[in-house]
Amino acid sequence: MDRLDKLLAKSIAELRERFLDRESPVPAGLLEALEVDPRSGARELALRIRHRRLRNRAEGQRLRGLLKFECELWEQGIELIAGVDEAGVAPLAGPLVAGAVILPRSYRLKGLDDSKKILDPERREELAAQIKADALAWATGWAEVEEVDRLNIYHAALLAMRRAVEGLQLRPQFCLVDARRIPHCATPQRGIIHGDALSASIAAASILAKTTRDRHMAEQDRLYPGYGFAAHKGYPTPEHREALRRLGAAPIHRKSFAAVREALGLEPVQADLFGHGSAGEDEAYA
C-alpha cells in the first residue's frame, strides 16, 4: 500500500485534524482522490482544503502588498526601516504609547494588519509576541498623562513616537510613520496616511503600541477600580462617562479633555487646532 492509499484508509476525522486543523502539507494527488471518494465527508474535506488554499493565497498577496513602501526603500539599499505608530489618542485616561519596529527584509506574518482591524485581543497579543521575537529591533515610547495635559494630545503623540524611535537598539536608516512626521528626529522619514493599513512595519508598530497600552490600562484598573479601565482602556464609552460622573476623575484622567473637565466642574481649556491645550512645538520637545 503506497502513501496515498494509507492516507485514504484513515478516517475523515483524522484527515481533517491533520490537513485542516494542523495545516500539514497536502501530498500530491490527495485532493483529487478525496474529490472522487464515495464518502461525502471526504469530498467536503477536499472542498474545505481548496478554500483554505485560496484564502492563504489571498493572504499572501495582501502581505506582499503591505511591503510596497518597504520594498521601495530596500531597492535603494536602505535595510533598517522602522515603522512607527501610536495608540491612545482618543481615550480620556491613561498615557499615549508609541511603537517602533524594524522588521527583517521581506517579512510576512499571517494576520499582520492595522491593530484596529484585529478585534480579538488574544490574537493581537499572539501577533505582538511573534513580532517581538522576529523583529531586528523594537521599542515603545510613552507620553504620560501630565505631558498630554501640558503639551496637547497631538504633540504628546509625536513625543511618544520620537521616544520609541530613540529607544530602538538598532539605529534605523529610515522611518515610515503613520500619518505624520516626527519633529526633532534625525532619521529620514515619510508620513503615510492610513499607514497602519498600508505598511507592514507601521502595522507591526501599531500592534505593539496597542497591546502595550492595553496591558497597562488593565493594570490601572486594579489601581483605580470602578471605572472599567480593563474593559474600555480609557476610551469615552457610555460606561466610562457614567463612572466618571459618578466617581469623579482618577489621577490618570486627562484633565485637559472636555469630558473630564466637565466631570470636575472645571471650565473648558482653550483648544488649539488639534483639540487640547496650546503648547508650541518648541515647548513640546524641550
Image (tube, rainbow, N blue to C red):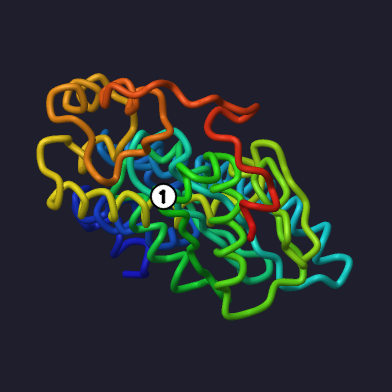
Q: Residue at x 64, y 52 (%)?
A: 283
The residue closer to the viewer here, 260 or 79, is: 260
Count of labels in the image: 1
Q: Is residue 62 shown above or below 262?
A: below
Q: Residue at x 25, y 45 (%)?
A: 251
Q: Position of residue 239 (x, y in %)?
A: 20, 23
Q: Secondary structure at mark 1?
A: helix
The residue closer to the viewer here, 36 or 85, is: 85
Q: Residue at x 40, y 36 (%)?
A: 47
Q: Residues within 10 Å of mark 1 (few under 14, many from 20)?
A: some
Q: Position of residue 128 (x, y in %)?
A: 41, 60
Give the quarter of the figure containing the N terminus.
bottom left
Q: Is residue 217 left or right of residue 269?
A: left
The residue closer to the viewer here, 128 or 169, is: 169
Q: Which residue is mark 1?
A: 146
Q: Residue at x 28, y 21 (%)?
A: 265
The residue closer to the viewer here, 200 or 169, is: 169
Identified by mark 1, the residue type is Glu
Q: Is residue 122 left or right of residue 190?
A: left
Q: Is residue 44 shown above or below 191?
A: above
Q: Quadrant of residue 187?
A: bottom right
Q: Is residue 149 left or right of residue 177?
A: left
Q: Position of residue 18 (x, y in %)?
A: 29, 59
Q: Is residue 78 shown above or below 229?
A: below
